[in-house]
Image (cartoon, helix red, strand yellow):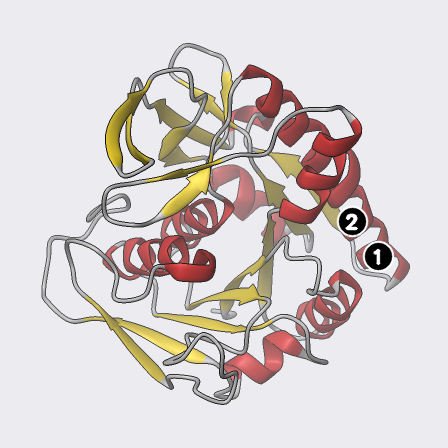
Amino acid sequence: MPETIVVKCGGNAAVDPRLVCRDIAELARGPARVVLVHGGSADIDHLAARMSVASRRLVAPDGVSARYTDSEMLEVVHLALAGRAKPRLVAELMRLSVPAVGLTGLDSGLLRARRKSAHRALVDGRKVVVRDDHSGRITDVNAGLLEALLDAGQVPVISPPALAEDGEPVNTDADRAAAAVAAALSADTLVLLTGAPGVLEDPADETSVQPVCAVPAKGSPPVRGGGMGLKLVASREALLGGVGRVLIADGRRSSPVRAALAGSGTRVVVTEPALAGVGAGR
């Protein structure tokens, strides 16, 4: 059985999507089956500024930060990911003679989510409840669609939004979407590419990469700053969902995926046994 690799390309402006696509093309020409999941934080922020929509974050009581998605921001997210980030990735893969199919979570119900009715967040040190955030947690992945595309030699290129139970779109974190996709496919490896060389002991020192980062099966991840908190939550969900290994690695370098597979970056492990299942933990 060919190895199945799910790659999440971070939306950090420092991550070069051309280098990511070039590496995926090399892997896809071999025996590996590759799925590319992407975010687009830089594209979202750029488009939000053009549309005069405020970009804000919600910080949970455990310190993990996520994008605040009101109705205007949900429109920006959809336009930025489906209209800017995804076409760029698909076009680059096609330029490299790799057949690719761009999908959002809405297409054929690829990503289904449970809408979050309320969020606990910290604002000016006070705990508040936010009720107008259009986001959700993935509950199901149409693995059959992805398997059919992979069997046909295609590289699926996937992004939020997801389809909520009420039939409306909701934003969902792209790292956690990648984890759900990897678990649904029983992937051998999930690679989360970001604008850092891995999980750092000291955020100000890029040489302080942790070769292994242990995450508890429940509760707060050990590192939460710089967007790393959600990546570690996603890593835990993937591992508890049956993914063979999860790597957090530098998306700014040449051959970023193959470098990660060869040992560059950080391997995430779960420290305690727990029941398997996507969405376990936080």
Disc 2 crowd, CA 10 A, few/some/many (<14, 14-19, 20+)? many
**Circle 1/circle 2 CB separation < 8 Å:** yes
Query: At x 52% / y 88%, what residue is drawn?
Result: 262
- Residue type, mark 1 in image: Glu
For this view, does 173 lie left or right of residue 149?
left
Q: Which residue is mark 2?
A: 90
Residue 158 x, y percent position in the rendering: 60, 43
Q: Under tag 2, what secondary structure?
A: helix
Query: At x 73% / y 24%, what residue is drawn?
Result: 52
Q: Under tag 1, what secondary structure?
A: helix
Residue 180 x, y percent position in the rendering: 39, 47
Query: At x 64% / y 57%, what residue is drawn?
Result: 12
Q: Nearer the viewer, residue 4 or 90?
A: 90
Residue 196 x, y percent position in the rendering: 55, 72
Instruction: Decide if residue 92 is in sight here.
Output: yes
Residue 243 x, y percent position in the rendering: 34, 62
Residue 92 is labelled as 1
